[in-house]
Image (cartoon, grey):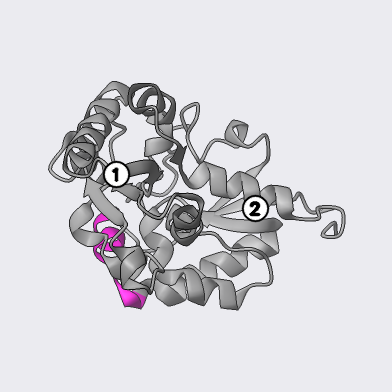
Amino acid sequence: MTLQSLGLLSLDDGLSPGVTPQSPRPGAMQNPATYNFPIITETVEGAWAEIMIRGCPSLEPACVAAAKRLVERGAIAISSDCGFFIRHQAAVAAAVDIPVVLSSILMVPMLLRQLPPAAKLAVVTADSTCCGEDLLGVGESADRARIVIGGVEGGKFLRDALKLPPISTDVADIELEVAACVTRLRAAHPEIAALLFECTGFPLVKSAIWRSSGLPIYDITDLCRLTLASVDRARLMV
């Protein structure tokens, strides 16, 4: 019997062969306890954080190949550990026959429909300079005008994430940077009524930001839970 799992496409962290990566922290999207469900991962070779954030079309075959390996290993849904994998959503979804949700950005159109027409949605990302409107899946100009994007580029979190191998940033430092970003966005756009965390590292500070902002917050863990809950696990038993 194959163990049914949530499959994750993983960034290439540059670790030497045989080196064990750090265990995911409590609340992390890579932690099985976040979903009470097994997780399996496949590294996308060459998908270093800097390259994935900036975007590289040549990585698409490696993403598809990794997704197929996850299916072979028992994945019943596929996500990723970087929201910028959204660029490869269509190709991966077309290559496998299970649900694929590579980024929380997929929720943008849905969240806009949940909010009043005059309200705005803030997308909080690791690097706003690389998170353009082309990634949001929103075609109408009126809808695009309701989305504001802010990031923590220039801060410690992104500097640590771009290193090879990456360094885990203290949760307190992540909270400070995300909170400062949210404060800036709300000062410029008082109409913001909800936050969407693009970065898969931000679920670690979701509760703290909710307490300080009072706004609804959505992230990749919400999308993964929804997807897992929608799958008929008994039908997929092999």
Query: Residue at the location (42% across, 31% down)?
Result: 206
Q: Is residue 57 magenta?
A: yes
| Residue 128: mark | none
Q: Give the residue at mark 1.
A: 191
Q: Main secondary structure of the magenta part?
A: helix
Residue drawn at the location 44% of the way across and 25% of the way down: 207
Residue at the image point whose x is 58% and y is 78% from the top: 94
Q: Position of residue 26 (x, y in %)?
A: 50, 26
| Amino acid type indicated by mark 1 | Glu
Which numbered mark, 1 or 2, is in the foreground of this view?
1
Residue 58 spot, x, y in % from top left: 34, 77
Residue 157 in magenta stretch: no
Give the total number of marks visible in the rendering: 2
* Rendering coords of residue 97 (x, y %): 68, 72
Dot 1 or dot 2: first in sequence order is: 1
Quadrant including the C terminus = bottom right
Q: Would you say 164 lies left or right of 83 here?
A: left
Mark 2 is on which residue type?
A: Thr
- The magenta segment is 49-58
Looking at the rendered structure, the secondary structure element under dot 2 is helix
Q: Secondary structure at mark 1?
A: loop
Image position of 192 (left or right of 38) = left
Between 233 and 163, the one nearer to me in the picture: 233
Q: Position of residue 45 (x, y in %)?
A: 40, 63
Separation (CA) of disc 1 from disc 2: 30 Å
Residue located 57% across and 72% down the image:
93
Please, is residue 130 above or below residue 26 in the view? below
Q: Which mark is residue 227?
A: 2
Q: Residues within 10 Å of mark 2 (few under 14, many from 20)?
A: some
Query: Along the horizontal axis of the image, is 25 left or right of 153?
Result: right
Q: Is residue 53 left or right of residue 64?
A: left
Mark 1 residue crowding within 10 angstroms, few (<14) / some (14–19) / many (20+): some
